[in-house]
Amino acid sequence: MEQRPGAHARVPAGAGLDQLRAAAADCQGCELHVDATQTVFASGSPTARLALVGEQPGDAEDRAGAPFVGPAGRLLDQALHQAGIDRADTYVTNAVKHFRFTHTATRRLHKTPDLAHLAACRPWLVAELAVVDPQVVVCLGASAARALLGPDFRVTKQRGLLFPRTARSADPGLVQAGWLMGTVHPSAVLRADDRDGALAAVVADLTVARSVL
């Protein structure tokens, strides 16, 4: 992978969300920007008490320029509804802002971002969460959990548990009041043999998150 400096120098100090979005649109902090259609920044309420952080944009998100608008997004909407959460009241973003994929003859297939991609994009995530300052941040999937809860966190063993943000984050930009949680990514639910059971588990995790809002 080509080594690039990451987004540190590209994040404007003291910026609001609109400024961050504009600055991120031209980010070349890692090589993923080369093949991606565009930066996919975030959507939702700038004053949300609940933030949802996924891994990276998928194919539909890359084309639309918005997070969680494809099949995984529709399943996330379903899970939020069943948990009694209005998506309009949440802040939705990703740990990595460009789509990483491999080409086939007919499709662009998702490829998991490396730790280097998570590190390169981390300044954007730190900056936007500092502005929104949600009460609860739910990490959707292993990559998002790795970015915010550390490399030792295991979604399969620790999903649905609430961790104080001040206790879990070694990054000063993320040491704020509130809670962190990890659960599975909606795309994993779509691939599950028991989709109903997997969806119910995500709903249960989101319900825990809602209980402390």
Image (cartoon, grey):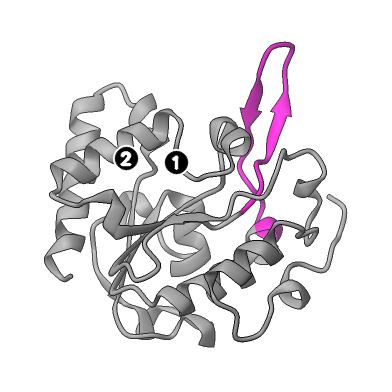
- Is 150 contained in the magenta span? no
Is 101 positioned to the left or the right of 86 in the image? right
Q: Is residue 129 above or below residue 51?
A: below
Q: Which of 115/17 is in front?
A: 17
Residue 6 in picture, x, y percent from top left: 76, 67
Q: Residue at x 41, y 74 (%)?
A: 132
Is 83 positioned to the left or the right of 123 in the image? left
Q: Earlier in the sequence, mark 1 or mark 2?
A: 1
- Write down the residue under mark 1: 68
Q: Is residue 16 above or below residue 186?
A: below
Going by the numbered disc 1, the residue's amino acid type is: Phe
Q: Which of 83/193 is in front?
A: 83
Q: Which of 138/131 is in front?
A: 131
Residue 101 in picture, x, y percent from top left: 68, 34
Going by the numbered disc 2, the residue's amino acid type is: Leu
Q: CA distance from mark 1 to mark 2?
A: 8 Å
Note whether residue 158 is visible: no
Instruction: Write the start and end of the magenta stretch as one range.
Output: 97-117
Number of other residues with Cα within 10 Å of mark 1, as a class: few under 14, some 14 to 19, many 20 or more = many
Is 7 positioned to the left or the right of 112 in the image? right
Number of other residues with Cα within 10 Å of mark 2, as a class: few under 14, some 14 to 19, many 20 or more = many
